[in-house]
Image: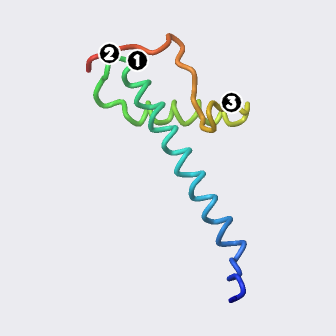
Amino acid sequence: MPAPALVDVRFLQSLEDTVMLDDREQAIRERAYAIWEQQGCPEGLSIDHWLRAEEEITTDEALGIRHEGKLEPALPNGPQDLEC
C-alpha cells in the first residue's frame, strides 16, 4: 500500500483563509442587499450599503455573533417584504 501523500500545511492554511474570505464577502453582500431593500431600493448608494454592511459584519465578528455557523446580522425591523 502506498504511503499517504504529505500535504503542505501552508497550502491548507491558504485554502482555509480563502474560504473564510469568501464566506465573509458573501455575508457582506447579503447584508448590503438587505440594507438596500430596507432603504427602499435606492439607486446610486451601493458603495454606502457595502461599507455599512462591512462595518456591521466586522462588529459582529468582533462580538462573536454567529448563527448556524455563518454570520447573520440581525435586521432591526425584522424581515420585510419589499417589492423593488
| Residue 22: % across, % down | 52, 51
Name the amino acid, label 3.
Ile
Name the amino acid, label 1.
Gln
> Which is in the foreground here, disc 3 or disc 1?
3
Among the two numbered marks 3 and 1 on one chain, the one whose residue lies closer to the N terminus: 1
Q: Residues within 10 Å of mark 2 (few under 14, many from 20)?
A: few
User: Is residue 29 toward the left or the right of residue 60 in the image?
Assistant: left
In the rendered image, the quadrant that contains the N terminus is bottom right
Q: Residue 46: give its label.
A: none
Q: CA distance from mark 1 to mark 2?
A: 8 Å
Question: Which of 9 and 52 lies nearest the eye of the viewer?
Answer: 9
Name the amino acid, label 2.
Leu
Q: Residue 82: give its label.
A: 2
Residue sitting at 73 percent across and 30 percent down? Answer: 63
In the rendered image, the quadrant that contains the C terminus is top left
- The residue labelled by disc 1 is 38
Q: Residue 65: give its label.
A: 3
Q: Residues within 10 Å of mark 3 (few under 14, many from 20)?
A: some
| Residue 25: % across, % down | 51, 45
Among the two numbered marks 2 and 3 on one chain, the one whose residue lies closer to the N terminus: 3
